Amino acid sequence: MKELDMTQVKQIISLFALSCLSGWTFAEIKGTSFVHENWEIYCDNTGTCRAAGYQDEDGSDAPVSILLTRHAGPQQAVKIEFALGDGFEEVKSSQLKNIHLYVNGQDLGTIQGDGRDAPILGTLNKVQTQKIIDQAQKSAEIHFKNAYFDWIVSDRGMTATLLKMDDFQKRVGTVGALVKKGATNENQVLKAQPKRVVQHIKVSNQPYLTLSPKQKAYQNLHEKLMAVLPQDFECEGYYANDDMQSQPIELYKLNNQKVMAMTPCWRGAYNEGSGIWMLDEAFKKAEFVTDQASDYEAGIIHSAQKGRGIGDCWASAEWVWNGQHFIQTVDRWSGMCKGIAAGGVWNLDLIDAVVK
């Protein structure tokens, strides 16, 4: 099977966030994401938005990102964090000292961050934060600079992305808007909502039955699973000796009425995914959960997919068994593939949840 690109992976994970909410008792805010040029934004189910900007492609020797976070509700301040990378090159700790922030040529003083190793992580002070916010609808030259490095944050996409934040949080035309300010107060802006709370019901970590492709029971069950596979999805197994070969199906007991089926679906250059289905004990009705599973442990499905081979960007997800359904508790992106750090630097969430 052809490996999915990271945009497709993130779309697939988000698509099934809603399908795994059967039995949810209140209307949550639906998280959203938006990407434009060198900026992206992710807003979660609590109403919190996180917008990240990065360097242009020609700045890969000095990779950088800033993250603007704002909670829903009136009179919420914006917090700006930064991450300064070294392009995966060895540098001396002395070269990561005395870094100043410049906005449109104005020296706004040193930044406060851990300068022992790259990436350097920290938070801007109020004056530095406000200066960047003031450029939300203008051109902005944002530099983090010392005698050795010049980290440049691109402003291409900044205005569109911050306008998306205003729109999602219903601040457009209000005194609190970042881009399209107005005279209206913030009484009617989006109100913050509680995190999703999910009770984890632990179940056996071992399959009670494994079916091989040559068994008749396998063929019957495999047909039922594939019948509910969403359109445009594939679960063909792995290539072996130039042939696509189906893989065993493992069955796990969830309770006296329901079981979980798991089988490897696809493998690419640096990612692979297993399909997960929930079935009644008689295997008459199957419900698809995901084809992005990387691991399963005692009622929790984990997914971790690289955006590219060097592993500087990841999409991750989790689904938790609550006794009746698998509820998605994580839908996260680590930020653009910009070479800032192995594993990525940010937690850009569409879902914010508490697992008990």
Image (cartoon, grey):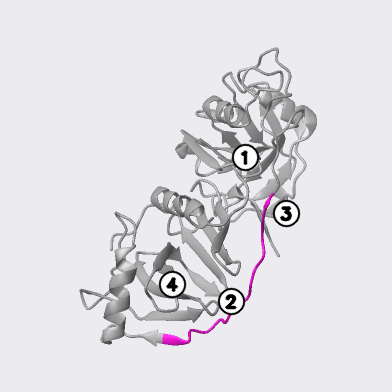
4 vs 1, front mark: 4
Asked if residue 79 is among those painted magenta in the image, a careful observer would answer: no
Real-space CA distance between mark 2 and mark 3, rounded to the nearest whole angstrom? 39 Å
Front of the two marks 3 and 1: 1
Q: Mark 4 to mark 2: distance in Å?
A: 17 Å
Residue occupied by mark 4 = 279
- Residue 163, horizontal then vertical, whole percent: 57, 26
**Residue topped by disc 2:** 298
Residue sitting nearer the eye, 276 or 331:
276
Earlier sequence position, callout 4 versus callout 1:
1
- The answer to whether the residue labelled 4 contacts the one labelled 2, judged by CB atoms less than 8 Å apart, is no
Instruction: Tell me where residue 191 appears, x and y as whole percent.
Output: 70, 34
Q: Quick check: is 207 in the magenta stretch?
A: yes
Instruction: Residue 116: give its label.
Output: 3
Q: Residues within 10 Å of mark 1 (few under 14, many from 20)?
A: many
- CA separation, marks 4 and 1? 37 Å
Numbered label attached to residue 50: 1
Q: Could you tell me which secondary element the residue under label 2 belongs to?
A: loop
Q: Residue at x 34, y 62 (%)?
A: 228
2 or 3: tag closer to the N-terminus: 3
SS under mark 1: strand
